[in-house]
Image (cartoon, rainbow, N blue to C red):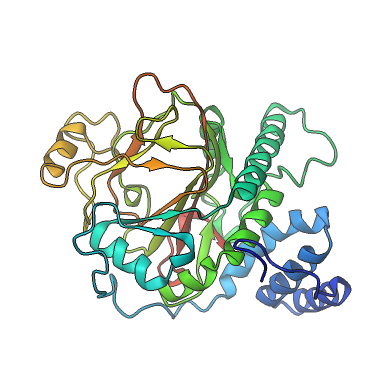
Amino acid sequence: MTPSGTLAADHIDPDAEMAAGRAAEQSGDLQTAVHHYTEALRARPDDALEVRMVDLRHRAFKQVAHGGGLESWPPVVPDLFEGCVEPPEIDASELTTEKLASAVFHHGCLLVRGLLDEAQVEQFKEVIDRSLEAFRARVEGTATDGSEVWCSFFEPSSDYGQYDVMGGRHFLVPQGSMYTGDSPRALKTLLDFFEGANLQSVFTEYFGERPALSLKKGTLRHVPYTTGTGWHQDGAFMSRGIRSCNVWVTLTPCGGDSTAPGLEWIPRRFEELVETGSHGALFDWAVGDGLADELSVDAGVIRPVFNAGDALLFDDLLLHRTGISPGMDTNRYALEHWFFSPSHYPTEQLPILF
């Protein structure tokens, strides 16, 4: 493995990997096919295969053994950050499953500094720009030949045909966002980075089984500074009994007193969903400001400064919102991707094999 977030490809024989991938796919072993095709793509670009890989990863999820996972949830873990100044914070080089679980299950989240380096930040900003440009062209009916690798509308398999995708796409447009799964190039780049940064092994141990991603809870963002969200827990949008962890990465300096909106949250662990649609909430999924004020009496509200490349990891119970103030005038680039335990997956979020 090369520096954090990148994978070496000089030892790969792309022809051999392609042959092995085709053989596995023809035999119906999609997990193995995904593995070999992924290796081939690291050694030799192939736009058509990148586009097809989104569907293969989606369909391969059915072949994951769903009987695994930790026996009890949340797991009982020691508080490695007891007495810390909130939030728990580490450098990316220090990330382990033990530290992630300890921070999330005792404090609600973990702030990871420098998950992406400067070059990776710029790479993902370019990926987001090109993907969003292709996305808008496809929505407007002006897509050009060859743009499919940057935007190809993902179609759920027949097992998930009852779940709406198009409505969500159009909801994201004015927010400067799109599903990562709708950009094959972005998805490939992201998964290569996550594996190179050791997140696959961290989350496999965290859940007790190989993690899965989601089409509907994985987004590329270039968010207008005027866009905000009210107080919420993401679990309010999903099935109950799930096991999750979100990786939110900013590609723009934000938060605190900077010019770009960041995140703010109540720095404590919530063990369940709180009441929604009351105390002045504007939506039935939102937590009203009045209730948030009550819940933050002891812990307060924090809005840390994030540097480009920093990440916040949290699960579906963290009570948070966009941290926006008058005078902010910088749009924010960000990546947001939820990982789930396959044995406790919210099927309406449309799985993608990691």
* Res 354 visible: no
Q: Identify the residue at horizontal 64%, vertical 42% (top origin).
A: 122
Furthest residue in direction right, as rendered = 15
Residue 28 horizontal side relative to residue 45, left or right:
left
Counting from the top left corner in percent of width and height, residue 72 is at 29, 77
Residue 227 horizontal side relative to residue 159, left or right:
left
Counting from the top left corner in percent of width and height, residue 35 is at 70, 73
Counting from the top left corner in percent of width and height, residue 13 is at 85, 75
* Res 4 visible: yes
Furthest residue in direction top, as rendered = 327
Residue 353 versus residue 261 in the image, above or below: below
Q: Identify the residue at horizontal 48%, vertical 37% (top origin).
A: 253
Residue 197 horizontal side relative to residue 281, left or right:
right
State the residue in front, 152 or 113. Answer: 113
- The quarter holding residue 240 reads bottom left
Q: Identify the residue at horizontal 51%, vertical 55% (top origin).
A: 115
Counting from the top left corner in percent of width and height, residue 126 is at 68, 40
State the residue in front, 168 or 195. Answer: 195
Residue 215 horizontal side relative to residue 327, left or right:
right
Residue 40 versus residue 285 in the image, above or below: below
Residue 314 versus residue 97 in the image, above or below: above
